[in-house]
Image (cartoon, rainbow, N blue to C red):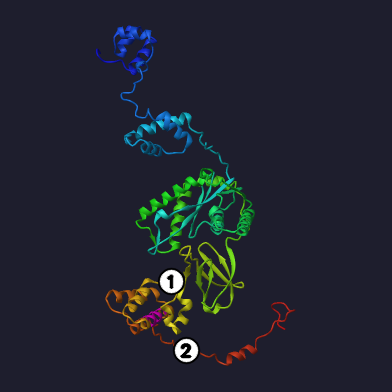
């Protein structure tokens, strides 16, 4: 039509029709005049190819600075951000308009594409079944998990097979350590039912941090022994280059997003116990593995068999029990039954627990504690271990160094502080210790805490005598057992029983 420009689409239609039609007919079908057709015959370029590039409509705001200042800055500091370049320019030239940021970004990106330094190249890998398994730790603080209302400071040990994508996650309460790696890796291998030929991890920098040279050598030897037990070749990626462990680094994000989705659907991030949270993680990981069942089954055929049993996944220390009724291990004080005072315990250190032995006899399992800070240690206290001694010396509760950790529930601590607020430390210590003893002897720690909370909320102090009466054992009557003696005539019948001789047949009587 007159006044309208011919488009690239019309031009292409014309060229297609021109293969079989005359210029006039092809132009009619394409929607323009025959005069335009004859003009096109002399120049077969598309209309968009005939347009001259649009020039600048305003002066270049970076022209005074580009060659003289910006390029020297980029060459001297190749990693400098665009905003850093702009800040430096505005410092030198306060009158420079900050609206040039987008223009500066485009110009610098184009310059770096043509003149910038060479970048690292990621080489995509093809993995064969049964060859490579990877281990790493990932921080999960963003999930906001709580156990019975208390925030859980933890991370996940994450194992993954490169070919099939099989994965296993283990909740780690402490930091990255050899113990956590050994326990998590062995759990993963025994859940998988086989062993890959190669195991890759990072440099274990967190596990080696702050260790003396001898301790580092010992850790290296234990890691080598772990790999030798399962027949895996140990490898590791270069320090600080995460993409060399990309088969598991990217999986960290996918797993944490799956956990986040499941927590949102669950409606709460609070769990009744650590075991309940671990079961939740296992369920989510199991669902992800179920989606890869075919590839996992294919890779299992290429895995090496497991050894006859697990190897050591703990550290071991021999520690004396002091007169304080416990021992100190890695700046944390643990209480044990007072019967063990003066003895030396062999303690197996796991990531989340301590297993204590007197010789080869197990004497208990303790929750593993952590120091509060670099300058303050921690306490793991079980009031049942010391309550018998505390009843004899209740005033020791006033300045006890681990007093706050002694209370098993907040209700007991609240009662103690309430009684002290009334100005009678002796009564506060006596009443609190007696209630702790009652909780221990009657096995009513939770129920007694609820009763104390009810009284305190009502503005009254608990009645110790009433609570003792309430939680005393129920009176049970002794059952009447009737014993019926056998008649002595029964023993006369035994004398008439014949004895079968050893040499005779079964039917022959001696």
Crowd band around label 1 with a 10 angstrom C-alpha radius: few (<14), some (14–19), many (20+): some
Residue 144 position within the rendered picture, expressed as x and y whole percent measured from the top left: 39, 56
Instruction: Tell me the element at label 2.
Output: loop
Judged from the image, the secondary structure of the residue bearing numbered disc 1 is helix
Cα separation, mark 2 vs mark 1, equals 52 Å
Q: Is residue 420 left or right of residue 118?
A: left
* Of residues 387 and 439, the one drawn nearer to the viewer in this rendering: 387
Is residue 212 or residue 22 the one in the foreground?
A: 212
What x and y, as percent, mark residue 374?
Answer: 48, 62
Position above or below: 129 against 204: above
In the figure, 451 relative to 57: above or below?
Answer: below
Nearer to us in this view, 270 or 489:
270
Q: Is residue 187 left or right of residue 109?
A: right
**Quadrant where the C terminus is found in the figure:** bottom right
Q: Tally the numbered discs.
A: 2
Q: Tag 1 or tag 2, which sits nearer the N-term? A: 1
Q: Is residue 178 magenta?
A: no
Q: Nearer the viewer, mark 2 or mark 1?
A: 1
The residue sitting at 55% across, 56% down in the picture is 209
SS majority, magenta: helix
Neighbor class of circle 2 (other Cα within 10 Å; few <14, some 14-19, many 20+) is: few
Task: Pinpoint residue 291: horizontal percent, then vertical percent.
Answer: 46, 47
Residue 331 in view: yes
- In the rendered image, residue 83, in percent from the top left (x then y), is placed at 38, 39
Which residues are drawn in magenta? Answer: 428-436
Q: Which residue is mark 2?
A: 482
The correct choice, above or below, for 238 with respect to 490 in the image is above
In the picture, the disc for residue 405 is 1
> Going by the picture, which residue comes out furthest to the left?
2
Mark 2 and mark 1 in contact? Answer it, CB < 8 Å.
no
Is 329 drawn above or below residue 98 in the view shown? below
């Amino acid at each position: 039509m007159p006044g309208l420009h011919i488009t690239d689409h019309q031009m292409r239609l014309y060229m297609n029709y021109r293969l079989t039609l005359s210029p006039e007919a092809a132009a009619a079908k394409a929607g323009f005049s025959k005069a335009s057709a004859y003009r096109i015959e002399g120049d077969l370029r598309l209309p968009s190819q005939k347009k001259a590039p649009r020039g600048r409509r305003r002066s270049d705001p970076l022209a005074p600075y580009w060659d003289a200042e910006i390029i020297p800055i980029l060459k001297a500091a190749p990693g400098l951000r665009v905003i850093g370049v702009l800040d430096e320019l505005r410092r030198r030239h306060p009158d420079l308009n900050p609206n040039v940021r987008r223009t500066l970004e485009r110009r610098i990106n184009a310059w770096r594409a043509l003149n910038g330094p060479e970048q690292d190249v990621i080489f995509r890998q093809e993995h064969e079944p049964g060859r490579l398994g990877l281990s790493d730790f990932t921080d999960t603080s963003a999930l906001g998990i709580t156990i019975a209302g208390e925030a859980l400071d933890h991370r996940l040990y994450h194992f993954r097979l490169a070919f099939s994508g099989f994965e296993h996650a283990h909740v780690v309460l402490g930091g990255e350590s050899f113990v956590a790696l050994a326990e998590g890796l062995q759990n993963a291998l025994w859940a998988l039912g086989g062993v890959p030929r190669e195991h890759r991890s990072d440099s274990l920098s967190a596990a080696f941090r702050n260790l003396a040279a001898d301790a580092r050598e010992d850790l290296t030897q234990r890691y080598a022994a772990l790999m030798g037990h399962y027949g895996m070749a140990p490898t590791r990626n270069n320090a600080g280059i995460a993409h060399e462990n990309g088969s598991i680094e990217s999986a960290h994000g996918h797993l944490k997003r799956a956990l986040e989705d499941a927590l949102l659907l669950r409606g709460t991030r609070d769990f009744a116990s650590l075991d309940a949270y671990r079961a939740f993680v296992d369920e989510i990981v199991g669902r992800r593995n179920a989606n890869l069942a075919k590839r996992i089954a294919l890779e299992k055929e290429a895995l090496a068999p497991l050894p006859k049993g697990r190897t050591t996944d703990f550290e071991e220390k021999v520690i004396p029990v002091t007169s304080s009724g416990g021992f100190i291990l890695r700046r944390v004080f643990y209480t044990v039954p007072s019967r063990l005072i003066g003895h030396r315990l062999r303690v197996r250190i796991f990531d989340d627990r301590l297993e204590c032995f007197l010789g080869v006899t197990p004497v208990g399992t303790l929750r593993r504690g952590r120091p509060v800070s670099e300058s303050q240690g921690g306490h793991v206290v079980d009031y049942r271990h010391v309550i018998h001694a505390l009843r004899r010396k209740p005033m020791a509760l006033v300045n006890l160094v681990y007093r706050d950790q002694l209370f098993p529930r907040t209700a007991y601590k609240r009662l103690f502080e309430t009684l002290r607020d009334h100005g009678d430390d002796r009564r506060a210590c006596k009443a609190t210790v007696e209630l702790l003893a009652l909780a221990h002897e009657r096995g009513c720690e939770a129920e007694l805490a609820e009763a104390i909370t009810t009284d305190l909320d009502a503005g009254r102090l608990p009645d110790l005598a009433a609570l003792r009466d309430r939680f005393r054992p129920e009176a049970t009557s002794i059952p009447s057992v009737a014993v019926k003696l056998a008649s002595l005539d029964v023993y006369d019948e035994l004398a008439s029983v014949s004895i079968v001789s050893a040499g005779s047949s079964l039917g022959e009587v001696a």
